[in-house]
Image (cartoon, grey):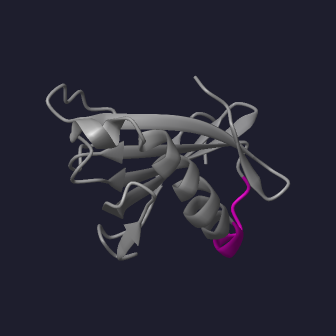
Amino acid sequence: MLAGATASLAVEQGAQGRIAVPSGQEVTLHEVLIDDAPGARWVRFRFVAPRAGVPALREIAGADMNHLCAEFALPYLAEQGIEAARVVISLSERAVPFGTAAPDVPQFFDLYRPEGGACIWDGF
């Protein structure tokens, strides 16, 4: 893959089933993107969270993303044999093509360093 290129792993929306998160909502994996930026591979896990726009859930979206990184992304990376310098977890009220502006769609993102079997928050 060329440096800076983004590749999408074939993940059919909902193929992983619904995933329960601490907020009580259920999310589905939309896609996994691999970005081989110079010097650092970033793997983006994009989830659809239909209730992302609910004000009470916005306040605890961070806990949901921490959970998804530790309980979904790290095992996924291990199973697929993918090494990542950074993991991005995103929650979106509905599927939006990567890189597309959608101001009417609530979206949340967090950045992590996978380290020693844990997700270390690495805020933007």
Residue 28 visible from this viewpoint: yes
Looking at the image, which residue is at 59% across and 60% down?
73
Does the segment drawn in magenta span residue 80? yes
Q: Which residues are magenta?
A: 78-83
Looking at the image, which residue is at 19% across and 30% down?
102
| Relative to 56, 61 lies left or right | right
Q: Residue 83: x and y, percent?
A: 74, 56
Q: Is residue 38 above or below residue 97?
A: above
Farthest residue, direction front:
56
Residue closer to the observer: 80 or 22? 22
Q: Residue 107: x and y, percent?
A: 31, 36
| Relative to 109, 102 lies left or right | left
Looking at the image, which residue is at 33% across and 32% down?
99
Q: Residue 60: x and y, percent?
A: 42, 41
Q: Residue 43: x and y, percent?
A: 58, 48
Farthest residue, direction right:
116
Residue 98 visible from this viewpoint: no
Q: Quadrant of the C terminus?
A: top right
Q: How many marks on residues? A: 0
Looking at the image, which residue is at 27% across and 44% down?
52
| Relative to 46, 74 lies left or right | right
